[in-house]
Every structure is written in C-alpha cells, then in structure tokens.
C-alpha cells in the first residue's frame, strides 16, 4: 500500500487567507482542491510538499454565476460533476460539460474540480509510476534524475498535457483569474500553459487559480470535444481535440482547434482552423484540409498509450469528427 508522506494541513476560509499561507510557506506548500491528482502524486513521491493548503472551505471558490448571454464565472472549486450538470453552462457551452463528463469516473468527478483539472500535472509512462519503479531507472529529468527516457538527448521534459477541459476552454476563448498577495490578474486559458513537461503552467508559485470565465454566447458559437483513450470507462486522454466555430448564415466566421495529449500543452492548430473561415462548416474539402493540417501539429512521443503513428493518424480522424459535430 502506498502511504502519504507526513505534512501539515491548512484549511483557510478566504482566498486572501489562502494566498497569505501560500506566500508564507513558499515552495514547501501545495494547494489541494479535490486531491484526485495531488494525493496520488504525493503517495508516489512525485510531489512532496510539507505543507498542504486545502481550498475546500473557501466558499467564494464554489459554484457558477452569471448568465449565458453575459458570460459565466465558474469558481475554481466547482466540481467536475457540477460543471457537467450546470444548466447555464450546458445552455452556453455544452462541449465543456461533455469534456467534464469524459474525465475519469463519477466518484473522482465528485471530488475533482475545474481549477484542479486546469492545473493537472503533465503525464508520462516514465513518470506516473511508484517511487520504487522510478528509482529503479534512476528517475528522470522531471524530478531527481538527469535523463529524459523518452528522448535521452533532450534537455527538456516532454510529459504530456492531459486535462480534458483545458482544450475546450482554450477553444471557446475562456479566461482565468489568478490571485496572490501581490494582487489579481486575468489571462486567457490558452496563455496559462507552457510547452514544458516540468514548468507546465504560466502561473507563479504564489498564485491561486480562483475562477474560470467562459465567454458570452449569442447562439452563433458551436463547440465540440473528441477524446481518444484506451478504456472508455475512465482513462486519461491520449489525444483530445476541441473545436469551436462562430457560424453566421451557415458560414464559418471564426474558428479555433486545440489538440491535447500530443505535447506538453494544448496546442493551437491555428493554421488548420484558418482553412475553415469563409467556408460552410460542412464543406468536405475544407474539413479534410483542416484535419490534415491539425494532424501535422500533433506530434505524439512514445510516452503515453498506443503506437505513435496510430495516434497521429487518429488526430486526423478526431479533428474530422469534431468538425462534423459543429455541423
Ligand atoms: C484514475 C484517474 C483517472 C483520471 N482521469 C482523468 C481524465 O480522464 N481526464 C482528466 O483531465 N483528468 C483525469 N484525472 C485527473 C484528475 O482527477 C482531474 O484532472 C481532476 O480534475 C483534478 O482536480 P482536483 O481538484 O482533484 O485537483 P487536485 O489534485 O486538488 O490538484 C491538482 C494540481 O493542481 C494544483 N491546484 C489545485 N487547485 C488549484 C488552484 N485553485 N489554484 C492553483 N493550483 C491548484 C494542485 O496543487 C495540484 O498540483 C484522473 C485521475 C485519476 C486518479
Ligand atoms: S518526458 Fe522524459 S523527463 Fe519528462 S517525465 Fe517522461 S521521461 Fe521524464
């Protein structure tokens, strides 16, 4: 049985108290929301904070507010189950609920939160293992070792972005609020991620992700999410495709496609999305060209599930399917 290491637990009641605790304890501290990622990582000694700051008691971080026509704000502590079932979110952006529903299992969705999902650690076959397993290969670049076993000549870690909601929030143009003792800032979700398996977030270590802001919906935007995984019942994505398009008079006025599971951040397939603009969303040639271009930027490495070539090929199929959903 894997046990948690010893740590001191704090239960602040307000965001400002949580931010003060984070500032006081510095890198020795970690935030925990649902704990469905942090606790297993601590059991495997991938993360070893000696202080854990729990956000569950911070009421202002829970729930959804606003209206579809003006934009909605989702508190970072809102559970994935709540995101899946929220009527206003479903009316505005059903693809977000669909992505949440495809995460893991019901018990984990009851605990896991939207904020935690965006801050989810990157994944790799050489990383998501017990301490002893990792020790037996002399660890790796991501922690305690000097070699990346996926790309031994590489000076960077290629662990993959694995959040299902992140690509959808990028595609629909959502933003997040980050709070620290120094103040507050709001950035697009697409700018939250870095193409680095170790430092995968553009978030300062003293910042708390407090809210996710989804844009207003006037009915002209449609969005979709398609996920590839081995077991439909609960696996992480080995490929995820989110597509969103603003359609005016049957013609695409704006489009965005984001691909996850094939790099350390959700990748913006902007060149693929650009092909669709000015075309009908069901234009077969445009969809085929967009799928071809999107597959070009999906460059999976041999560090998750399935054969690389097949995953790359599946990128083409999943983009085609996601665009068919929009039509
Ligand atoms: C068996 C299993 C299957 C899973 N399958 C999937 C899947 O298919 N798709 C998927 O996307 N995920 C999956 N997950 C991962 C996880 O359950 C979800 O990503 C979940 O949403 C994480 O949210 P959480 O609140 O539990 O995060 P936590 O574990 O609490 O936190 C995750 C990370 O984010 C940091 N953090 C948490 N909240 C904040 C905040 N407000 N501000 C700043 N930092 C914060 C924590 O310090 C930690 O590093 C799976 C997990 C398991 C165990
Ligand atoms: S990509 Fe390389 S450095 Fe990163 S977790 Fe995997 S083996 Fe380790």
Image (tube, rainbow, N blue to C red):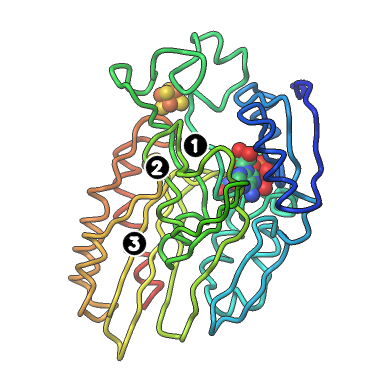
Q: Which mark is residue 64?
A: none
Q: Residue at coordinates 67% horizontally, 53% vertically from top-left?
A: 113
What is the C-alpha distance between the residues marked 1 and 3? 20 Å
Q: Residue at coordinates 57% horizontally, 62% vertically from top-left?
A: 212
Count every numbered label the image shows and give the total: 3
Q: Secondary structure at mark 3?
A: strand
Quickly name the residue at label 2: 194
Q: Is mark 1 within 8 Å of ligand 2?
A: yes
Dot 2 or dot 1, earlier in sequence = 1
Circle 2 packing at 10 Å, graded few (<14), some (14-19), many (20+), is some
Circle 3 packing at 10 Å, graded few (<14), some (14-19), many (20+), is many
Instruction: Report the side of 184 relative to 312 (left or right).
Output: right
- The N terminus lies in which quarter of the figure? top right
Q: Quadrant of residue 83?
A: bottom right
Quickly name the residue at label 1: 122
Image quadrant, ligand 2: top left
Instruction: Report the side of 243 relative to 116 (left or right).
Output: left
Q: Residue at coordinates 33% horizontally, 82% vertically from top-left?
A: 247
Look at the picture and state if 214 lies above or below 4.
below
Q: Residue at coordinates 78% horizontally, 59% vertically from top-left?
A: 59
What is the C-alpha distance between the residues marked 2 and 1? 11 Å
Q: Which mark is residue 257?
A: 3
Q: Nearer the viewer, mark 2 or mark 1?
A: 2
x, y percent for residue 305: 45, 35
Look at the picture and state if 136 lies above or below 166.
above
Instruction: Report the side of 296 relative to 306 (left or right).
Output: left
Q: Quadrant of residue 88?
A: bottom right
Viewer-side residue, 230 vs 262? 262
């Amino acid at each position: 049985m894997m046990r948690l290491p010893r740590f001191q637990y704090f239960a602040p009641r307000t965001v400002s108290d949580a931010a003060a605790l984070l500032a006081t304890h510095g890198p020795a501290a970690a935030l925990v929301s649902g704990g469905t990622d942090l606790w297993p990582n601590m059991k495997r000694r991938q993360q070893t904070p000696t202080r854990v700051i729990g956000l569950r008691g911070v009421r202002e971080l829970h729930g959804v507010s606003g209206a579809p026509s003006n934009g909605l704000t989702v508190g970072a502590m809102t559970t994935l189950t709540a995101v899946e079932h929220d009527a206003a979110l479903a009316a505005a952006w059903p693809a977000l609920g669909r992505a949440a529903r495809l995460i893991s299992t019901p018990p984990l969705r009851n605990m896991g939160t939207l904020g935690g999902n965006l801050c989810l650690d990157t994944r790799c076959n050489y990383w998501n293992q017990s301490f002893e397993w990792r020790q037996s290969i002399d660890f790796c670049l991501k922690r305690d070792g000097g070699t990346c076993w996926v790309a031994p000549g590489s000076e960077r870690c290629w662990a993959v972005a694995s959040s299902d909601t992140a690509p959808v929030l990028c595609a629909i143009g959502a933003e997040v609020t980050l709070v620290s003792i120094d103040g507050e800032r709001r950035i697009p979700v697409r700018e939250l991620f870095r193409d680095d398996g170790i430092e995968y977030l553009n978030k300062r270590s003293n910042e708390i992700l407090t809210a996710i802001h989804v844009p207003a919906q006037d009915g002209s935007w449609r969005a979709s999410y398609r996920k590839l995984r081995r077991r439909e019942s609960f696996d992480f994505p080995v490929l995820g495709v989110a597509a969103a398009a603003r359609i005016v008079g049957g013609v695409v006025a704006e489009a965005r496609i984001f691909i996850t599971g094939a790099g350390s951040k959700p990748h913006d397939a902007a060149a693929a999305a650009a092909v669709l603009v000015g075309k009908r969303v069901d234009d077969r040639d445009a969809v085929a060209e967009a799928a071809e271009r999107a597959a070009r930027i999906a460059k999976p490495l041999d560090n998750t599930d399935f054969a690389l070539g097949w995953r790359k090929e599946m990128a083409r199929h999943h983009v085609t399917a996601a665009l068919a959903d929009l039509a």
